[in-house]
């Protein structure tokens, strides 16, 4: 056990770099977004799933892919006391599929799932990029067609709309079938090999085993080489092109605007067909808000039977940053009523009165820590309450309570405890 003597007083303990506290005043925006995403998910028939924050490391090696930024350098991996390698989840898609298989949710069934929660990646912390961050995601398991792809995009768009977020652009692409992608991979490798000196070192390393990942490089030299590179769309088979066309028709039918970016690949290896990304030009370099696509191979990669699947993950820190930038004020939580009590008998009356009001769903903040009436009324004002109720020596032991409006709704009055609830309700209903 830690004794007091083991705590030296050099410096106060700080949070881990890149992992943020969310304080009262900030949490309100989060609750608003969480409320909206819950409601929108329900509107489309998606049900919540909660999986552990810690998973076996193997889950991510087999799903995200060994030659990805996440697995190569971003995972928080540790060995527990049993010698087992565990990892703080860097994303939750693999966990959803694991859980679906483990609990038999994917046998002859389809599942529309959503989740929200913290993810962990050891990246260089900067605005919009943290080591603990939060994602909202949906996973549609068991459907092969473009209809479900259109659905998840539409769901995302409704979420932006319900939050009043504007100016997001949608880019889509398709990675085609395994065969088509194989042919494309060869053509891309051949082209890039001719320009190997102009590529950044990560891309040079990926050239042999995973040249498609180079399309995702943020290096400007590599980007310049890619301008002339062969395009994935030339390698699509007819059926794939038709599916992709159908997706576009479905999006157009519900008025969702998009552009096709033939170089959009995603940073995780499990994507197999259509991919997409919502971006903003208002957050600087951290422009991706939401990204996803089809990942038909993932279930088998994890040892389950084949399950066609599509989903997305949305970064909540970036979404909330956008909300704040776009001046979407979220009201700060404040009580309706502040209850001030002066004197020992008054405190007993006040405690009973507060409980009765709470029984009727009124939010009451009690004055704790005593203080003279002036001090208590200052606290009442700071609490943001609409009215203060005062029980003092004059009213203690009687059935009367003083009611003091705090937001310009008239003068102080005195009411009986029978009338109190109705009086409080009228004040709380009046706009200030
Ligand atoms: P980026 O290109 O910005 O690194 P990514 O491709 O690694 O993003 P995904 O794994 O697709 O991101 O995760 C989906 C979303 O989660 C991103 O679009 C982003 O909004 C958010 N996100 C990813 N990593 C972080 C992070 N370190 N901090 C905050 N948000 C993040
Ligand atoms: Mg990343």
Image (cartoon, helix red, strand yellow):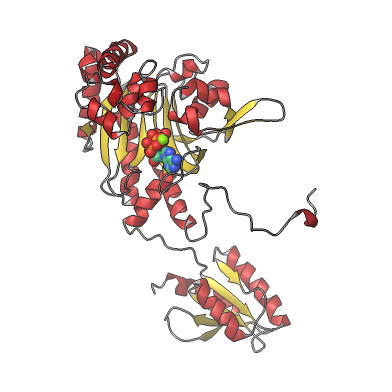
Q: Position of residue 207 (x, y in %)?
A: 35, 19
Query: Percent from the top left, x then y, of residue 423?
Result: 50, 76
Which residue is more in the foreground, 177 or 416?
A: 177
Residue 181 vs residue 378: left or right? left
Q: Which quarter of the frame holds ligand 1?
A: top left
> Residue 241 location, x and y as percent?
22, 18
Q: Residue at x 59, y 75 (%)?
A: 339
Compared to 150, does 181 lie above or below? Answer: above
* Relative side of 245 to 117, left or right: left
Residue nearest the observer in this picture, 13 or 156: 13
| Along the viewing direction, whichever of 264 and 413 lies nearer the viewer | 264
Q: Is residue 386 visible?
A: yes
Q: Can see residue 42?
A: no
Q: Quadrant of the C terminus?
A: bottom left
What is the quadrant of residue 197 in the picture?
A: top left
**Does residue 422 appear to the left or right of 188 in the view shown?**
right
Residue farthest toward the bottom in the current orientation of the protein: 394
Depicted 220 relative to depicted 309: above or below: below
Residue at (43%, 84%) from the top-left corner?
410
- Between 157 and 301, the residue placed more toward the observer is 301
Please give the count of numbered marks on the rendered protein. Answer: 0
Q: Residue 255: percent from the left, percent from the top?
A: 21, 38
Q: Please name the residue shown 49% across and 24% down the image.
A: 97
């Amino acid at each position: 056990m830690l004794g007091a003597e083991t705590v030296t007083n050099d410096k106060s303990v700080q949070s881990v770099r890149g992992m943020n506290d969310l304080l009262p005043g900030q949490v309100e925006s989060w609750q608003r977004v969480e409320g909206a995403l819950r409601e929108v998910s329900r509107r489309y028939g998606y049900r919540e799933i909660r999986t552990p924050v810690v998973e076996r490391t193997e889950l991510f090696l087999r799903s995200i892919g060994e030659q990805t930024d996440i697995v190569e350098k971003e995972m928080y991996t540790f060995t527990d006391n049993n010698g087992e390698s565990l990892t703080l989840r860097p994303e939750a898609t693999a966990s959803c599929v694991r859980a679906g298989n483990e609990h038999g949710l994917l046998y002859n069934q389809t599942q529309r799932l959503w989740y929200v929660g913290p993810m962990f990646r050891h990246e260089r912390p900067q605005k919009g990029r943290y080591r603990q961050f939060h994602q909202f995601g949906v996973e549609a398991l068991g459907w092969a067609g473009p209809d479900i792809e259109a659905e998840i995009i539409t769901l995302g768009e409704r979420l932006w709309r319900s939050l009043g977020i504007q100016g997001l652009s949608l880019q889509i692409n398709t990675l085609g079938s395994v065969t088509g992608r194989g042919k494309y991979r060869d053509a891309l490798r051949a082209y890039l090999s001719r320009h190997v000196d102009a590529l950044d070192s990560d891309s040079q390393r990926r050239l042999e085993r995973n040249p498609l990942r180079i399309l995702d490089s943020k290096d400007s030299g590599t980007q310049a080489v890619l301008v002339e590179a062969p395009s994935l769309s030339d390698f699509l088979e007819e059926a794939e092109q038709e599916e992709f066309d159908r997706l576009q028709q479905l999006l157009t039918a519900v008025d969702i605007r998009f552009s096709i970016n033939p170089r959009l690949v995603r940073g995780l290896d499990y994507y197999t067909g259509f991919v997409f990304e919502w971006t903003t030009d208002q957050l600087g370099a951290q422009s991706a808000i939401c990204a996803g696509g089809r990942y038909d191979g993932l279930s088998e990669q994890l040892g389950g039977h084949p399950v066609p699947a599509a989903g997305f993950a949305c970064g909540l820190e970036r979404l909330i940053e956008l909300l704040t930038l776009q001046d979407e004020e979220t009201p700060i939580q404040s009580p309706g009523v502040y209850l001030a009590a002066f004197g020992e008998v008054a405190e007993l009356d006040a405690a009973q009165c507060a409980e009765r009001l709470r029984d009727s769903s009124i939010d009451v903040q009690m004055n704790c820590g005593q203080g003279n009436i002036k001090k208590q009324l200052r606290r009442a004002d700071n609490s943001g309450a609409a009215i203060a109720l005062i029980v003092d020596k004059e009213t203690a032991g009687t059935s009367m309570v003083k009611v003091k409006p705090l937001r310009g709704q008239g003068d102080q009055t005195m009411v009986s405890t029978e009338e109190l609830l109705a009086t409080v309700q009228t004040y709380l209903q009046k706009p200030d």
